[in-house]
Image (cartoon, grey):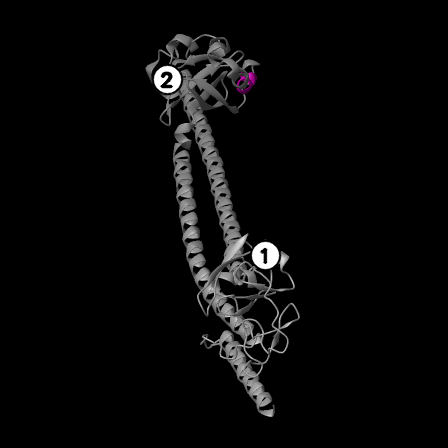
Amino acid sequence: MIIICEECGKKYRTKGQLKKESVKFRCRSCGHVFTLTRKDLSENRGEAASLDGLRTPEPAEAGSGEIPGGKADGEREEAHVGISGTPSEPSVELPAETAEMAYGKGMGLRTKMLLLFLVVPLLIFAGAGAFYLIQMERFSETMLRDSTEIARTMAENRIRDNARLVAAQCKQFLDYYRALNGSDLPKETFNENAEFRKIAMQRVGLTGYTALHSIGPMIPWVHPNRKIVGKRLLQIVRKPLGDQFVRFARIVKDIEAGKNTENSGYYLWQDADGALREKFMVVTPVKGTPYGIASTVYMDEFLRPIQEMERKALKNIQTVRYIVLAVLGATLLLMAIIVFSYASRLSGRIRNLTNVAERISVGEMDAEIQVETGDEIGTLAEAIRRMQDSIRLSIERLRMRR
């Protein structure tokens, strides 16, 4: 529709719908300020509306040769047909305050660029960062799990070798004692014989030890705790082991049955402070005798370096996660600034060219093109400038012919 300023007669052509309930206008010719509402647009659709109250201007008297707010027939320029279909003076673009009317439809170029060059990379970077962190955590978990298994295997082999070595030394001592004295060393004196006790009870690691026992049932004869020497072991440890008794009994079941075979396994032992700690025990026979050697030790002393490495790895992963998030945030912020700045400049140039094209379309041949760039936008501005010159020359030729 065409809106007419009642102060000076300047005409403005509008299109589209208002995004807000009302928009203020300032006439470029006289500076008169007025307000346009959605209701005004709907009521005056298809008519030439006055800017002040939006009253339809009264028709000129017959033969007067004037259009309200316009010029005389001999002075006026080529008439322009507005939306209403009635002749009117050449209209101009809307003021800057009404840009949302002219450009209110669809998604703007700046918004599209922000979505394309900011939101999409954000999703890609976030996905890539999450994938990287997940893979790093999985690698760390796999490495620590494999390292723990390797450490366990090495510790088990060490304890097993230690038990076999002690068993071989005990066999050698007993054979030597028999050869020297013509009889076997009585088992009741094993724990009192300082030399044999030193051989049968050796330290394993920092917390473990070896002990000598007889089979069927398992009765310790050399042990750090002298109170249990000569007593059936399963009856003594049943209460302290509690729920772990089944696991312990499974390790020594062959010894209890009178089978002098090698066996090993894990169980939890409760310390004096009530903490449960994992132990590994190996029972191996002293060949050629009814005795065996039990070697037991807390596993945490072998796994402590791995556990410490695990804590450091988790701490490093946490640090790397913060670094990745910080770098990602800084990168996205920089991208947002660059994209927003460039998009604003680009959309501003396109808006300027669009305004110029609108003004040319309603007859303002003196509209100034202010875009001077060496890219495609500059090429478009130059094309519109040439079009403006061509239209101006065409109008001048038509006037000269008249």
Residue 199 in the image: state x and y as whole percent.
37, 21
Q: Position of residue 48 (x, y in %)?
A: 61, 66
Residue corresponding to mark 2:
196
List x then y, in percent, for residue 192: 35, 11
Crowd band around label 1 with a 10 angstrom C-alpha radius: few (<14), some (14–19), many (20+): some
Q: Give the range drawn in magenta.
A: 250-255
The answer to whether residue 18 of the structure is visible from this angle is yes
C-alpha span from label 2 to label 1: 114 Å
Residue at the image position 57 percent from the left and 71 percent from the top: 68
Q: What element carries label 1?
A: helix
Q: Mark 1 points at which residue?
A: 40
Look at the image and say whether residue 371 sits in the magenta stretch: no
Q: Residue 10 bears which disc, if any?
A: none
What residue is shown at x 53% (from left), y 84% (from top)? 389
Quarter occupied by the C terminus = bottom right
Instruction: Tell me if residue 184 can be seen.
Output: no
Circle 2: residue type: Phe
